[in-house]
């Protein structure tokens, strides 16, 4: 089992969710996060004062998938989240050693 974690632009969430559903990936966790990278933030004016916004709002998606579904999960996320602009995000893949569904007690792939 693998955890596919992606950092994406917030307005791409619905497209990514639809792409994952079409790829047969069910279930994900979404968190609002802020990040700093090559995009470097931007400046805003508030009540006449200019200030720098270094950490930009992003979304973090986490999906636990079987090892055989990793490539199609990555392809679905990358295809739906890509705008071609700086700040599109990143995808990470981590190993998951054990999973348990609390309600039924199912473990590992049965718990997905």
Image (cartoon, helix red, strand yellow):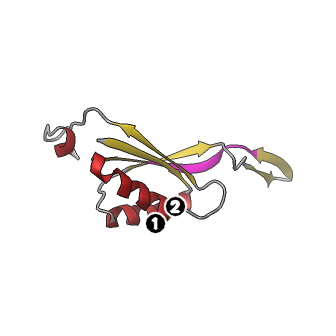
**Residue 95 % position (x, y):** 35, 36
Q: Depth check: 47 or 84 in front?
A: 84
Circles 1, 2 touching at the beta carbon (< 8 Å): yes
Q: Which residue is mark 1?
A: 15
> How many numbered circles are shown?
2
Residue at 82% in and 53% down: 47
**Residue 67 % position (x, y):** 29, 46
Q: Alpha-carbon distance for marks 1 and 2? A: 7 Å
Which residues are drawn in magenta? Answer: 53-61
Q: Depth check: 96 or 45 in front?
A: 96
Residue at 59% in and 56% down: 88
Q: Is residue 77 left or right of residue 11?
A: left
Instruction: Using a 10 Å C-alpha cutoff, classify the residue at mark 2 as few (fewer than 14 neighbours), some (14 to 19) or many (20 or more).
Output: many
Residue 81 is labelled as: 2
Comparing labels 1 and 2, the label whose residue is closer to the camera:
2
Q: Answer yes or no: is residue 72 visible.
A: yes
């Amino acid at each position: 089992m693998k955890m596919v974690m992606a950092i994406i632009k917030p307005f791409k969430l619905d497209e990514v969710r639809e792409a994952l559903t079409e790829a047969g990936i069910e279930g994900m966790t979404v968190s609002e996060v802020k990040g700093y990278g090559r995009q470097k933030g931007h400046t805003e004016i508030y009540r006449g004062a200019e200030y720098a916004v270094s950490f930009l709002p992003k979304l973090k998606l986490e999906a636990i998938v079987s090892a055989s579904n990793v490539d199609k999960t990555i392809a679905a996320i990358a295809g739906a989240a890509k705008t071609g602009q700086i700040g599109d995000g990143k995808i990470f893949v981590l190993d998951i050693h054990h999973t348990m569904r609390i309600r039924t007690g199912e473990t590992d792939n049965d718990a997905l």
